[in-house]
Amino acid sequence: MAGESEGNSLQSFSPKNESNTTNDINLETLRRRVRKYIEMHLYQAAIFWADKVASLSNEEAQDIFWLAQSLYYSGQYHRAAICIKSRNLHKVDLECRYLAAKCHFAGKEYKEALDVLNVNESNISAISNKPADILDIDADDDIASAILLLKGQIYEAMDNRGLATDCFKEALQHDVYCYDAFDSIVQHQMLTKEEELDLMKSLPFDAQCSEDEPNIVKFLYETQLKKYDKPSDLSIPPEISMLAENLDIGTALAERCYYNCDYEQCFQITTAILNKDPFHLNCLPIHISCLMELDKINALFYLAHKLVVLYPESAVAWYAVGCYYLQTTQTDTARRYLSKATTLDRVYGPAWLMYGHSFAVENEHDQAMAAYCRASQLMKGCHLPLLYIGLEYGLANNIKLAERFFAQAQSIAPEDPFVLHELGVVAYQNQDYTNALNYFQESLKRIQTSEQTVLPEKWEGLLNNLGHTCRKLKLFDEALSFHEHALMLIPQNPSTYAAIGFVYSLTEKWAKAVEYFHKALGLQRDDVFSNTMLTSVIEQLVKETSPCIDTPDELLEYPFPSDLSSDVCNPSDETSDIMTEIITDDIQSLSDHTHHTNISMDIEMEGE
């Protein structure tokens, strides 16, 4: 009763106005002022005057729409949605319907947003009698594309990526210029490389673009597609040659360099981009990854700190912090910040990958695999989650499952050197050494570029694996060459020295084998393999080595002279004295030597 009387009193209240008309007020001027304030980001002023215009116009639909628009821009999402829905404008006006759903989406009310979009009233001329999730192809393409884009974003937030992908693709069919839909598909890795190419072929560029634009739009979109091919010079159409210095084009090239393991070149490109635009959102994840690959910890710390201060609500900021702590082996702290990144953006795949890495470095295979599986769901078109899942299965000695995931990763990125390397490891474990050698050689070929004179340290394992495989195939010279190359990357690796020693022992070069096993044990004293091999090799060396090197086995025979000179048989007294002195000196030297030797022996015995 109290609420009813209060409502009646509110309805009966009105300022004294004898004419009660708006004939003397130019509403169009006020409407233009509302739009002007929105453009100037003066949202409170826009709300104030939009509210007054709505009252003066007896709540015309366009005025309610601009009032809700002002509320939306000021962050009052629920109030804006109620402003439209309380008047049922979402049922009769397509733009109001879109705005109301967008308000619910911004307020994280995904089910309510979807319900608003699925309203299908017969008096909405722009909507056909088809199912509610399909817009009439004759409807306004701009608003149709926007609604499909919003619906895709809602489905993605609800973890229904299949329907989200369909909506994004349909949005592009209505408007090929709808970059939001294209960016969602590409950046969130929703399609495989082949599916991306099929999408590009299906888009109606010629129908929707003017004569000189189809090639431009195609070129700009193609630079954003999968980057697993070798980077090449971008062939920019002459009419847009000025785009050669565009930051988005540079980011696409940097990403391609990164996926092809050219981290130095990628770092140079991303650094140049961030010098011009320090917070280029698409470039930041690539730059952060480069800082990790090149172990630039101080630069990573500075960047992460700056991002958190300026963009505390951005997932990439906390992702950078998590990467820093992971790089400094503080895994618990890294997980805390990476978890915050995934909370801010549930579909941020890189954070899920790093979250898995934080468990993998501690051999927590189950937790790592759970994070990688989540990343795989979010990044359907990316091979990295599948690769890491295969790695975890391989470490758990489940070779069959590991091989299956590596094969899936190869189907997405057939020339990725990491995938080829892991396939080679599986083939080696299956004793298929010929295939293993082929995989390892293909992997090495992919990472060798003309710009790189020395391979990064991370590929030391590949070179050693090539050496092991060549040894199995009895290609000993090639095996030694690969192991020695691996030593150039990491000179103090005891396993590499042991591998070289093993090759020398197989070729019966015992002295060389002893030398390298000694070096291996000098770096790692408890190496069981090197200890065992060293004992065996020394035994072989003793068996096959003569006691006195370079000394003939048979004694030389000298004939005894038949006639001796009188001088020799009867030496003079002078000569006899000299000989006696020499002999006496020799005896004294021998006596001194024996004395010192006895002292040494006494010291050793006392020590015992």
Image: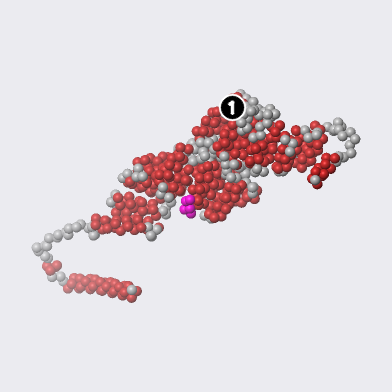
**Residue 80 within the magenta-colored segment of the rendering:** no
Q: Specify whether 434 is left or right of 67.
A: left
Quadrant of residue 248 within the rendered picture: top right
Could you say where residue 334 lies in the image, as x and y percent from the top left?
55, 53
Which residue is drawn at the image coordinates 15% and 70% (left, top)?
A: 571
- Asked if one can make out residue 476 in the rendered structure from this viewpoint, the answer is yes
Could you say where residue 187 lies in the image, as x and y percent from the top left?
56, 39
Label 1, on which residue? 205
Judged from the image, the secondary structure of the residue bearing numbered disc 1 is helix
Q: Which residues are magenta?
A: 362-366
Q: Magenta stretch: dominant SS?
A: loop
Which residue is drawn at the image coordinates 70% and 42% (left, top)?
A: 77
> Which quarter of the figure is the N terminus placed in?
top right
- Between 362 and 578, the residue placed more toward the observer is 362
- Asked if one can make out residue 454 in the rendered structure from this viewpoint, the answer is no
Could you say where residue 281 lies in the image, as x and y percent from the top left?
61, 42
Q: Amino acid at mark 1?
A: Phe
- Between 561 and 332, the residue placed more toward the observer is 332
- Between 31 and 107, the residue placed more toward the observer is 107
Could you say where residue 439 lies in the image, as x and y percent from the top left?
40, 41
Residue 10 against residue 548 in the figure, above or below: above
Which residue is drawn at the image coordinates 65% and 37% (left, top)?
A: 115
